[in-house]
Image (cartoon, helix red, strand yellow):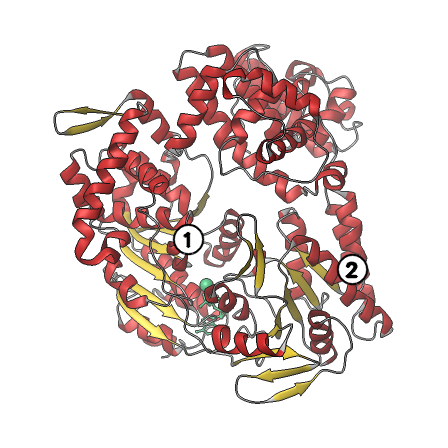
Amino acid sequence: MDLSRLSLPPALRDILRRRGVERLYPPQEEAVRAGILEGASVLMATATASGKTLLAEAAAVKAGMEGRMAVFTVPLKALAYEKQLHFSYYEGLVDVAVSTGEYSSEDRWLGKYDVVITTYEKLDSLLRHRPNWLSNVGLIVLDEIHYVGDPKRGPVLESIVAKAKYLGLKAQIIALSATIGNPEALAKWLGARLVKSDWRPVPLREGVYHGGEITYSDGGKRRVAVKAEPEVALAVDAIEEGGQALVFVNSRAATAKVAGRIAEFIAASGEKLIDPEAAAELARRAQEVAASKAIGRELAGVIAKGVAFHNAGLELELRRIVEEGFRRGVIKAVVSTTTLAAGVNLPARRVVIADVRRRDPLLGMEEIPVMEYRQMAGRAGRPGLDPYGEAIAAASSEGEAEYIMERYIKGPIEPVRSQLFSDVNLRSHLLGVVGSGYANRLDDVVDYLSSTLAYSQLGAVAASVARAKAEKSLEELTAWGFLEKLGEYYYATELGKLVNRLYLDPETAATYIDMLRAMRGSSPLAYIYLVIKAPDVPKIWRGRFNKKAAAEIISAFPSLLLDEDDEEFREEVKTVEMLWEWANEADEDKLYEKYGVGPGDLRVYADLFEWLGLAAAELAKALGMEERAEELRRVSYRVIYGVREELLELVLRLEGVGRARARALYNAGYRSLADIAKATPAQLAKVPGIGERLASSIIEQARALTAAEGEGLLKWTKRR
Ligand SMILES: Nc1ncnc2c1ncn2[C@@H]1O[C@H](COP(=O)(O)OP(=O)(O)OP(=O)(O)O)[C@@H](O)[C@H]1O
Ligand SMILES: [Mg+2]
């Protein structure tokens, strides 16, 4: 279908043409016929690279231009910012905002935007706050809807849909996924028309590699001349054929190792395969940008040979450099964990899947789901980038090769199943339902639950199971003091409302409250320990166990009977220790070498402390523990910014000032806003890392702040 036949505003059509879209792909055409551009809810269960996301973007822009606000959700914060870059194509047509984090805010400011890009969690939290602008929302896009089966993220997605339905929002829902085994059931639950197709704009050939040979699912074979470990041989083979390779490995350590091996082969070929000058230039940039010089060196070393690694330990800036370098063809192979598995468009002619098994911290070696395999495979052969794509999995034996072929390449994708009715998830969900006034009596709660996927998947027993489980959860929430029951009605207590507003899991909130009550004395280590008790905070196992730190924590919580021989406790102590070093300005290299924690991980911890640490402080305040609340805030901000106490005023108040610049300013004698307000731009510009422009801006900010508030008055407000 040619674009000119679509009911699109002409300006939008022009922009799509400029993006290289002349005609719609067949699955897109079908979605248009199903009414995706006219307000009909649609589930697109169509192949990877079939243009789902692009069409949903167009639908969102069209909605925005017609005065219906569109909310576009993505699974990860990092993807939200990438999506924002995408939307800059539509500049002038719609105003676009990104909103992630700060779950306790209702973000009234979002009301004036046409398109809001957000994560699932953020939209769920907004639906709990019920800001006025919700009634203007005319379209909700749920990209990568297969996450609805994920034990943690899934219930959040479900709750978005259930709340939107229950609020009677007239919002159209567009849900997208290339990898769901039971799209019919999902479409029925969503109340959406189903568009299903296997069509792909660029053919994808899949195969298995074993004993030096690729066997394709169509029966074809190819001998690989390169003698090396399978994933290395497959990548080098692709590069020698003039293509680029994306290699998925199952651990972070393997990303750097395998990248190093591929780089050796490229170097041995006399660098004929790459553009050495462009690679050297890119390597310099990576080294310059890297917050950890050790990671920077490691990465620059392979980039100079046209290879890179990509994992969650890298900060976003470095990941972007790698992705850009790969897009420009300067980098020929990227070795990644699943950070690059979903939704992205990269010019990978060959995707290599090094292992279909992965270590699960609880279960040991596990096979990955077919769904995940297909997402990785689908990164190969993206339109406009390559004439065809290949996805090859490495097998360690003949038997495994057959198994991969049958299960992962030819077999069906598993159906998604709701996880909402697990105890933890349901409790959290129901506090939101009652606390935000969606339903108050058990009957109404059950009625509300009837619009969830969980309910629709239970079949004939749904009503009785939902009732029994809901009642149990409501009773538990009541026992914790978050709800109270008056006659038939449940109400959120003040504490319950607070927990709901803070978007805390009730079990985490109950833990925090118990620990606050049990706490003796006041030690920063104990506060950090309290915050990281939430299961959301990843624990580390590397590093030496510090007995002194452990003793300090144990003595702060005598009634918890903590045991220093307990493995879980030891990991928690290491995590506390690492964060405490960070908050005492240890540099990124040290943390990386000692604990294996990279700048990307530190960013994750900072985000968690912004949410959980500040939430714990609010709980302390609600319990009448003003001093603890203040100390929790201070410690949290120190972890968020990675600074000692004395730098808090500078990092918290001044835009453009992070830990490094704040330290430089402080050491040069500029210790407070008042000091800076008195300086001249020329003086300040002498401080390392502060250029002329920044100096003026900082002075202006400091003057405005001190004039408005007088000296010494600290209100923590800067948006990060
Ligand atoms: N009709 C079209 N004509 C030309 N290019 C298109 C068209 N539709 C989409 N594209 C381009 O094809 C690529 C893949 O599209 P998109 O990312 O929307 O696919 P997807 O179905 O969302 O894939 P995935 O399942 O992997 O997320 C993008 O680069 C997009 O700009
Ligand atoms: Mg997509």
- At x 52% / y 18%, what residue is drawn? 715
Residue at disc 2, secondary structure: helix
Cβ atoms under marks 1 and 2 closer than 8 Å: no
Which callout, 1 or 2, points at the residue further toward the start of the chain? 1
Image quarter (top left, top right, bottom left or bottom right) of the C terminus: top right
Where does residue 351 sit, x and y in percent of width and height? 61, 71
Disc 1 crowd, CA 10 A, few/some/many (<14, 14-19, 20+):
some
- Left or right? Give the position of 360 relative to 416: right
Instruction: Give the residue type that dot 1 points to.
Output: Asp
Foreground disc of the pair 1, 2: 1
Residue at disc 1, secondary structure: loop
The label shown at residue 624 is none
The label shown at residue 150 is 1
Mark 2 vs ligand 1: CB below 8 Å = no
Closer to us: 423 or 612: 423
Disc 2 crowd, CA 10 A, few/some/many (<14, 14-19, 20+):
many
Question: Which residue reaches farthest bottom?
Answer: 220
Q: In which quarter of the image is residue 258?
A: bottom right
Q: Can residue 559 be seen in this view?
A: yes
Q: Which residue is disc 2 drawn over?
A: 302
Question: Which residue reaches farthest left?
Answer: 487
- Left or right? Give the position of 604 relative to 130: right
Where does residue 64 sit, x and y in percent of width and height? 34, 53
* Relative to 635, residue 587 above or below: below
Label 1 and label 2: CA atoms lie apart by 35 Å
Closer to us: 633 or 681: 633
Closer to us: 700 or 668: 668
* Relative to 192, residue 627 above or below: above
- Left or right? Give the position of 351 relative to 94: right
- At x 57% / y 62%, what residue is drawn? 357
- At x 79% / y 69%, what residue is drawn? 275
Instruction: Give the residue type that dot 2 points to.
Output: Val
